[in-house]
Amino acid sequence: MTDPQTSLTTDSATLAEELFAPGVGAQAGPPTTPASDTGTAGAGPGSHSHGGPAPTGSPAERFTSADPDDFPVVTGREEQWRFTPMKRVRPLLEGADSDARLELTSDLPDGVELTTVGADDPLLKGLPEPVDRLAALTRVRAGGATVVRVPAEAQLDRPVTLSLRGTGSDEVVWGQTVVQVGNFAKATIVLDHAGSAKYSGGVTVLVGDGAQVELISVQEWEPGTAHGGQFDAVVGRDATFRQVVVTLGGDLVRLVSNVEYAGPGGTAELSGVYFADETQHQEHRLWVDHATPNCVSNVVYKGALQGEQAHTVWVGDVRIRPAATGTETYELNRNLVLTDGARADSVPNLEIETGEIVSAGHASATGRFDDEQLFYLCSRGIDAETARRLVVRGFFADVVQKIAVPELADRLMGTIEQRLGALPGLEEQDVEAGELQPA
Amino acid sequence: MSETTGSVLEIRGLHVTVGEGDETKEILRGVDLTIRSGETHAIMGPNGSGKSTLAYSIAGHPKYTITGGTVTLDGEDVLAMTVDERARAGLFLAMQYPVEVPGVSVSNFLRTAATAVTGQAPKLRTWVKDMRTEMEALEMDAAFAERNVNEGFSGGEKKRHEILQMGLLKPKMAILDETDSGLDVDALRVVSEGVNRAKANSSVGVLLITHYTRILRYIEPDFVHVFVAGRVVEEGGKELADKLEAEGYAAYLKADADAAAVASA
């Protein structure tokens, strides 16, 4: 079912005591081994599973480490990497030291603090660990971190915006960002990526108890860009975390988004929109780890593809551990293929280890916008470009509407519609020149 | 577009093939038809005779290749137009198998189509009223407007939706491709009444393609054309439909050995 990182069978025992239990410990202990997650986060009643379902030794257990060398060198055959074009991600995986940076422009509402901390800062020790070699390299190479602090009970009058612009350097840019939102605060943070770069960035959002945080990450990169990233959210008690990922540009974008709950009653809504054009590779991997009771997760990712070798990958993992009673979770991925030659991979995984949940479900579907649909709309007088716009706008609308910044939502929809205009009309696709002439 | 009088759709010597290279197959082999405003023509024929090909060729489906002949609407060359231009010129095709369009609501679709066909966005107030009136007449629930186009529609719902479009878009010429197929008696009555309403409210010319005579009890044709092996083999008034009802297509098929080959393919 889930990421069977079959080469990693060591380290589980030693790491099991880590502060952040989710994902800790290697996978695939034999079924007779007590579950490695017992007695960790969540403090649920009696994590031992006597009488309950036997520990599965599930491969859903994920290995994490801050040390890149704890991960084997990536070959491209691993479950986590099998979809990723190695040639494009290689410059990042080589892990060369670099001082290159993205140009940062920030817009900070009153009360919001933007600082940097060094590699030794205690803040960084407590973050969820990297889940793959690239993320671990990123953590090490970035050195310190850029930190955004929103004080407790703050109500921001506008979004925090960090515009990150690639300068076109061939040197890899390593980045680490930590967003720390105090208890009961309400904040929207926009990470707006543009320009051209080889970039690998970690982003951790620490959501205080009762806080409401929306993180919007826009990837509107220019061609030539490779962007790898790991997002982690630690959702406080009764807090709500919303993440909207919008990937439109770049040759390679591979983003891993993880969610864990620091206490009961948390909600995570992870949404995504992606639009892959010719030869673009866009990969979004999600991991929601329910280890505490009464938390909610809701995942909706929608993608459109057009052009030869446009490739998107969506992998959505949700794990409900034995302690996570009262969990409510749903994940959905839909893909709309607009032309031949594009490929959408969609892999939902749901691992349920307790029966005492509210609901759990997933759905995945990939559909085509084909010539028959185009013909149908055109036969009602609608020109081909308007027809495509109608379909794609309708398809993306529910996710784009979740973006709490209207002008940003409009801008992104505008970008999408502009790219639709490049496609040929119905007659230009199938009918050869001259064949309408009388014989 | 509603107050057009004296429109005429002329089909002359129309030859159409499907497929490419060695797979090329001639479906229409010289079709001649003239349809004027206000007239209703029934095209009847056995399966595989090319009735639907005629409908789709006029509408401009890219699957079909016109190898000869002409189609004009009021003297304008229809074959030179794109699919959407044909619709804007006043042609409408009610499809036998309407296509599902995910992500697009019926109301959004209809409004976009009406805007395209009339050249301007319809006034919201009158538009909503018109739509509601048409839908009620077709016994369609109001919630229908918020569903995605044809997605999960029953056979009857799809056909009602086609006729709803005909009523709202007010074409000069409407081609109804086996609109009666797959309908139970109630749905057939509702859909037929919708067509008759459109005829009463405008001067639309109707080309009614059907396999069965059943729908002709509800929609009275002025002319009946028997279509076999890619062309019209007999023409007459509505009494011809009664003859077909009694005798079927056997006599026509026997008369044309070629036709039999095409029809069974």
Image: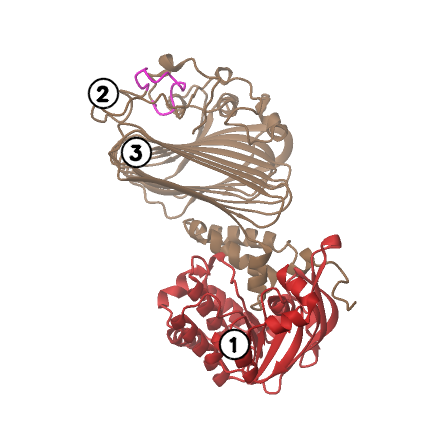
Chain colours: A brown, B red
For residue B183: magenta? no
- Of circles 3 and 2, the one toward us is 2
- Are tags 3 and 2 found on a single chain? yes
In the image, which is nearer the foreground, mark 2 or mark 1?
Answer: 1
Residue A148 position within the rendered picture, expressed as x and y whole percent measured from the top left: 41, 34
* Local crowd size for mark 3, using a 10 Å CA cut-off: few (<14), some (14–19), many (≥20): many
Residue B166 percent location from the top left of the image: 50, 74
Q: Is residue A337 above or below residue B260?
A: above
Query: Tags 3 and 2 in contact by the CB under 8 Å rule?
Result: no
> Callout 1: residue from which chain?
B
Q: Main secondary structure of the magenta part?
A: loop
Give how far across and how far down residue B190 sits, in percent.
41, 74
The CA distance from mark 3 to mark 1 is 75 Å
Image-quadrant location for residue B137? bottom left
Give the labeled residue for mark 2: A50
Residue that mark 3 sits on: A236
Distance between mark 2 and mark 1 Cα atoms: 75 Å
Q: Which mark is residue B245?
A: 1
Of the numbered discs in the image, which one, if any, rests on residue A205?
none
The percent position of residue A112, horizontal first and vertical second, equals 39, 39
**Residue range (magenta):** A20-36
The vertical placement of A267 against B18, above or below, is above
